[in-house]
Image: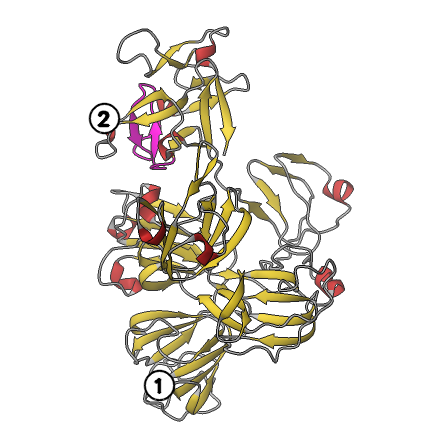
Amino acid sequence: MLLFEHVQFGGRAYELFRDVYDATSFTLSGEFSARVVRGCWILYEKPGFEGRSLALEEGNIELANVWEADEAIPTSPMVIGSIRLAVSDYSPPLIALFTEPCGHGTHTQYHCETPELCMYGIPQNTGSIKVHSGVWLVYSEPMFQGLLAVLETGEYPTPDTWGFPSPAVGSVRPLCMGPLKVENPAETKALLYEQPGLQGPCVEIQGEVFDVRNGHTESTPSAHSHTDTRPLRTVGSMKILSGLWVGYEEVGFEGRQFVLEEGEYLDWTDWGGVSKQLLSVRPVLADFTSPRMKLFSAVDFGDVGASVDLLEAVVDTQNTGYGLTTNSIRVFSGVWVAFEKAGFSGQLYVLEKGLYEEPEDWGAENSNIGSTMPVVQVRTCCQNPTSAEKDGFLTNVPLAKWFLFLTLFLTFIHFVFNIHSFHWVNFRGSQTLLKPGEVSDWPKVSGWQQIGSLRPLMQRQVHFFLRNQESGLLLSVTGSWDDIKLLRVQAVAETGGLDQVWSYQNGHLLCKVRACVCVLVHAVFLLLGQVNLPHQVWSLTSEGFIRSNANPDLVLDIKGGQQYDRTHIILNTHHPSRQSQRWTVEIL
């Protein structure tokens, strides 16, 4: 983290890598700024991590003197007593809220952001709290409003212990790490120390080290990247100056892997090791833009079994409907980190562009992949706005981070082209959004004589409710997910469950519980990808009808009547005046 004396990242800067027990010597004005590059930090009013606190998450932020709340315009210098790096990994957070003081009464546990803890609009009565793991922000009102308390691991027996006058908690959320990042991927440089605490013999490296014990002989003899080739018994600590690196427990890039981002690692616990041994390291040299990866449950990328195409981080692969088993991987672009368990935990494996035919290829002893994450290439904002705009980066982005792109200069003989699908946007420089259609005279329309680069603008999946306009009930999945053939689609009152949340992709209606399962014409389910026939495909009209592509005269309807199956969804002949055939799409 970087703390700046003034706003807009001006004045003296303080670069922090870890806890500061006494930060009272830092000189900060009444209004200052912070750039949190990695992790979540807590500022304390007093030395020794005592007094009031302020939580900072990854990103850029401008702050006023929060200790002097009475000042309309802060003039008193901000004095920070101490600073702690509160969240530095992806360990799952857990908090328990009890209805009575001192841990008595019924309790509810939360693992993730929960914007509303209300019953009938009234905040939940919370007499005591226990934080099992992580750092949590607790609010007195729903939607993260009202009084705020920053709670670290421990027990809080009464509301006054977390600073609330009454036992009302409306919402909670944990502080969370952002994605893995690299700022300077083209320049790789690191300092390796034999002893912990950046002590002892030290060597500077700019390339891979096959075995640190053998005078750092590299696997490529012609590469001379070391300024010092003295052998080290092991790596006790290190400083990654630039680039993304991978460390290995064994020589020859074997054994347990560790992702090494830019920063300081004072001992083996800082890089997540299970022992003090680290014997080989290498930089990752790749294009970090537009990451894409495909997981296969079968070996050798076989068609038998499931597969899933990934463009962004996945916290739990089982929630996608794909499952936990992965026997082959194809990385189309970017750099990915695969984790053995869900929640970015367990052993990790760094995956670069290429084909991995079996788990052994990525260094695994089993076929479990529980979560995945791409490495994001960013740069922090420039202090000179003019220079930033020249490079095509704007300084008014809220988190002041940009993806960097390699400009490809394309030469066109004729400036005529068709946009068949998606939206497209340039990588650097001036940008324009291209919607589907034909551009017959590009220089005349845009005023540009050349196009530097193009890429599709991939939009996030949209989820929605389908609410029947006659009954107000939601299109829902009922039955046991253990046997897909027994599942049925019914109209049910809103429950808040994922079995009522839908997405629409390539004509398929997909349930969020398992995104690989789609609706068929007989209101049963099938794994997406087994076949691709018209009876799997639906059209949502502007009038609210859901038509079958197999027979456009048939639409989804509620059966009705007085029998047990009156709420079942059926296919019925289209009747424009029948409200039970009309559905409202409610975007979530």
Chief SS of the magenta region? loop
Task: Give the amino acid at mark 2.
Answer: Leu
Q: Is residue 329 magenta?
A: no
In the rendered structure, the answer to whether residue 413 lies left or right of residue 360 reads right
Q: Residue at x 34, y 63 (%)?
A: 349
How would you rate the neighbour count of disc 2 (Cα within 10 Å): few for under 14, some for 14-19, many for 20 or more? few
In depth, the one of 463 and 26 nearer the eye is: 26
**Residue 427 figure quarter:** bottom right
Q: Please name the residue shown 26% across and 26% down the image.
A: 487
Q: CA distance from mark 2 to mark 1?
A: 58 Å
As drawn, 150 above or below 383: above
Left or right? Give the position of 312 relative to 77.
Answer: left
Check disc 2 and report its element: helix, strand or loop: helix
List the residue tagged with mark 2: 486
How many residues crowd mark 1 within 10 Å: few (<14), some (14–19), many (20+)?
many
Q: Which mark is residue 212?
A: 1
On screen, residue 164 above or below 305? below
Q: Nearer the viewer, residue 6 or 281?
A: 6
Amino acid at the residue labelled 1: Val
Is there any visible trace of residue 147 in the rendered image? yes
Range covered by the magenta-colored residues: 512-533
Q: Position of residue 181 (x, y in %)?
A: 50, 64
